[in-house]
Amino acid sequence: MLAHREHARGELAHKLAARGGDAMVIERVLDALEAQGLLSEERFTEQYVGARIGRGHGPRRIREELRQRGVSTGTAGEALERDPEFWSERASRERMRRFGEAMPADSREWARQVRFLERRGFTPEQIRSVLGPPPGGQ
């Protein structure tokens, strides 16, 4: 499995258990792989975060996906730690890629773009920095 791509420890443990592996044996094997440098949560996390950023995902979505794969909160937080302007720029790029250069003209379109950016995993602060307040002051 590690020959194809990096895995998080929890993700690999789950896959091995699903194939009928004994929990104690799995833990020993994973410990040995970590000791040899063949399994690294940090390496997996860096690669995963880079790939998800490249696909236009925001920090909230990436953090949740890492949690689902068993990556520790601390490791995920370190990998997602970026300049706040970085995430706002990524949100802006995703908005323009999907909706074009023009900003939303009415509150309905503004709400539609907010929902899109929320689904991509951007925070309310990042979305506000891109879209500003809704048109008409609502």
Image (cartoon, rainbow, N blue to C red):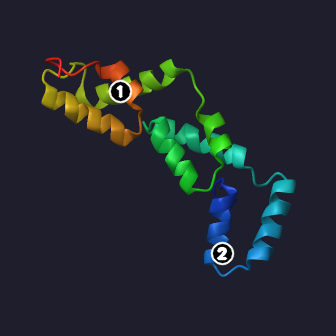
Estimate the x, y position of residue 19 in percent, counting from the top left.
Answer: 63, 78
Estimate the x, y position of residue 74 in percent, counting from the top left.
Answer: 67, 41
Depth check: give the residue in front, 80 or 52. 80
Depth check: give the residue in front, 21 or 75. 75
**Residue 7 falls in image quadrant:** bottom right
Estimate the x, y position of residue 4 in percent, counting from the top left.
Answer: 64, 58
**Residue 90 falls in image quadrant:** top left
Q: From what the image shows, is residue 91 above or below residue 74?
A: above
Mark seen at residue 127: 1
Q: Secondary structure at mark 1?
A: helix
Q: Residue furthest front?
A: 138
Q: Residues within 10 Å of mark 2 (few under 14, many from 20)?
A: some
Total number of numbered discs in the rendering: 2
- Residue 54 can be seen, yes or no: yes
Image quadrant occupied by the C terminus: top left
Asked if residue 57 lies left or right of residue 8, the reply is left
Q: Earlier in the sequence, mark 2 or mark 1?
A: 2
- Residue 3 can be seen, yes or no: no
Mark seen at residue 20: none
Residue at coordinates 47% horizontally, 26% vertically from top-left?
87
Image quadrant occupied by the N terminus: bottom right
Question: In the image, what residue type sits under mark 1?
Answer: Ile
Q: Give me the C-alpha separation between circle 2 and circle 1.
A: 40 Å
What residue sits right under mark 2 in the picture?
A: 17
Q: From what the image shows, is residue 125 above or below residue 14?
A: above
